[in-house]
Image (cartoon, rainbow, N blue to C red):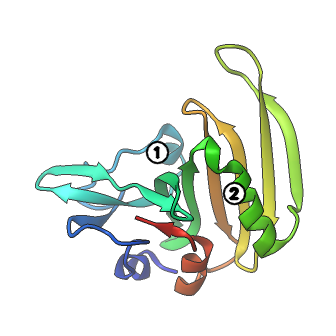
Amino acid sequence: MSQADWRTLPPPGKPSPHTKAKCSNDPDAAGLTLTDAERSARVVVCAYVDAWGTLSLPVGFTYDQKYPLDHLRYWFSGSRLTQIRATASLEAFAALIGDFTRRYGAPMKLVRDSIPSEIGPLPRVSETWSTPQGSIDLIDPTLPSDEIALRFTARGPVSPAGAAHSLKGASR
């Protein structure tokens, strides 16, 4: 899917009348706060924000109508959607594993390692599922927020239907 095609799609769930799409290459991208990784990735990062005049606030979504899904970002490279990223609360870990396993079978990759933290090494689990559109990575935890990272990566061009299917269960 192209960035232009993505802009024509409605946000997941039931957005407020103030919800709009913003991208890092927009002339007025000031309300879109990027992480260091997003700034250094050399991609266009898009998200939904609630715009109130000059103030833009991030839009939160829920997964499966009960788990908070934050920092929902769409990454475009060469104007093509290549990744959808989000974070979720630790409480969603078992539900997400169950959902992805029901949809796509057992993970094709499981990595247990540790990451440095201010209290010493912290155990981390990364699981990867293969999907018809590409892959899904679930990483628990991510720092500094101690949340779960979700990454949907396209194998090739992502169709609007494929992008919508990847986030089935996400709503506002």
Residue located at (63% from left, 45% from top)? 91
Does the rendering let one see residue 137? Answer: no
Residue type at the position of mark 2 = Ala
Q: Quadrant of residue 148?
A: top right
Q: Which residue is mark 2?
A: 95
Residue drawn at x 88%, y 65% as measured from the top left: 106
Left or right of residue 22, residue 110 in this image: right
Indicate the secondary structure of the residue bearing disc 1.
helix
Looking at the image, is 84 positioned above or below residue 58? below
Q: Position of residue 144 (x, y in %)?
A: 56, 29
- Depth check: 127 or 74 in front? 127
Q: Farthest residue toward the front? A: 66
Residue 5 or residue 41, whichever sits in front: 5
Sequence-earlier tag: 1 or 2: 1
- Is residue 32 placed above or below 20 in the rendered structure? above
Residue sitting at the far top: 119
Report whether 3 appears left or right of 49.
right
Please name the amino acid that badge 1 sits on.
Arg
Quadrant of the frame with the C terminus: bottom left
Q: Nearer the viewer, residue 62 or 8?
A: 62
Q: Position of residue 99 (x, y in %)?
A: 72, 66
In whole angstroms, how far apart are the C-alphas of marks 1 and 2? Answer: 31 Å
Residue picked out by circle 1:
39
Residue appearing at x 57%, y 49% in the figure: 88
Could you say where residue 140 lies in the image, as x and y percent from the top left? 71, 41
Badge 2 crowding class, 10 Å Cα cut-off, few under 14, some 14 to 19, many 20 or more, is few
